[in-house]
Amino acid sequence: MDLLQENIRTYGKIHDNRIIQVDSFLNHQLDIKLFNEMGKEFQRRFANKNITKILTIETSGIAIASIASQYFGYVPVVFAKKHAGLNMSEDVYSAQVFSYTKNQEYTIKVSKNFLSPTDTILIIDDFLASGAALMGLLDLLKQSGSKVAGIGIAIEKGFQGGRQLIEEHGIQLESLAIIEKIENGQVYFHSPKSSQCS
Amino acid sequence: MDLLQENIRTYGKIHDNRIIQVDSFLNHQLDIKLFNEMGKEFQRRFANKNITKILTIETSGIAIASIASQYFGYVPVVFAKKHAGLNMSEDVYSAQVFSYTKNQEYTIKVSKNFLSPTDTILIIDDFLASGAALMGLLDLLKQSGSKVAGIGIAIEKGFQGGRQLIEEHGIQLESLAIIEKIENGQVYFHSPKSSQCS
């Protein structure tokens, strides 16, 4: 998706040829106009999938998923919690996820009330890197018996192996921008048409 | 706002005549159609305020603020972080907040890049109870020199003193549903027209 790639090129800050900071438009300050374009594109890629609910994970996936819902008939958005408060029901599906950014394992939880075998779920998140968070979400969905329609990602770090993990499960994975490599402070995107860097 | 009150009455779960759980539509599963109606109502109440940015706080404010932005000309949404990761810049405004729900103090942070003296900020959050989180956000805005246009809240627990704290600062506070009391498992709303319970 050209608009997202442009934003990454223009506003993304690269650290150590590995980390790309997109906090000015994607995960701290949020560009809601851009999120609407992303929502439309997700809809295009997952049209006719009869999605009944969108599942995401706190924190940065929430805004993207909520705006996207508007292009899927305003289906409910459910977010898995990383930091469950005292108010959370005990009756939850839960899974363990290892975070490479924070270098620790954490538990994600979703109330059993909000995922059911009659649901067809689209997972949406901001980043795909190792795929650990997505595997946790897929685990929750397996427990609930919900059908997985696919996974929509804003930015995929194509060099960190997450895609392979997802595709082994036969799940449709759509990333709006796939970073193939970061070299000398430059971001190279995967171009689906030619499989060449652009 | 009638639609929100209806949702609270129909789907809210009351515990100990004190806690109202609204996780089926407001802060775990999200009703995006309802959020759009809330966004329209916030716009009506803060029209002509020349808002340049919306500030909220993770987690539950993010979706409400993001949907509302669409009714304020798609202004950027910035969320204060409670759980800053390794990727966060060091150059932040920060404030201490005491959480009564989790019974602990935490630090909220916003990157200095995203709040400036030229900004006119609308704060949006899901709940107002003691007002501790809002006082933290106002502290961040004071540090940044941004102008505060007002505060928009989904559900105010009118019996917990937060409103007084905000109004002492001369700030316009608009809550879409004000709970006056919870008694015998019943929610009583403040009705602005008659000041009677309904």
Image: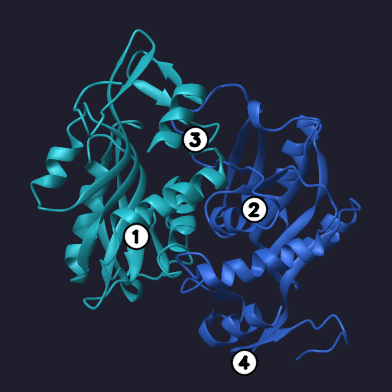
Chain colours: A cyan, B blue
Point out the frontmost of discs 3 and 2: 2
Give the amino acid type for the residue marked by disc 2 in the picture: Ser
Q: Which residue is mark 2?
A: B69
Q: Earlier in the sequence, mark 3 or mark 2?
A: 2
Which element type, helix, strand or loop, lies under badge 2?
helix
| Structural distance between the alpha carbons of marks 3 and 1 | 23 Å
Q: Residues within 10 Å of mark 1 (few under 14, many from 20)?
A: many
Residue A108 location (% of width, % of height): 32, 54
Find residue A55 and name its label: 1
* Mark number, residue B84: 3
Residue A16 placed where, x, y %? 36, 13
Quadrant in the rendering for residue A129: top left
**Is tag 4's residue or tag 3's residue first in the polypeptide sequence?**
3
Amino acid type, residue under disc 1 in the picture:
Leu
The quadrant of the rendering that contains the N terminus of chain B is bottom right
- Assess disc 3: are there few (<14), some (14-19) or many (≥20) residues with their C-alpha within 10 Å of its C-alpha: some
- Asked whether the beta carbons under mark 3 and mark 2 sit within 8 Å of each other, the answer is no
Left or right: where does residue A177 sit relative to residue B24? left
Measured Cα–Cα span from mark 4 to mark 2: 37 Å
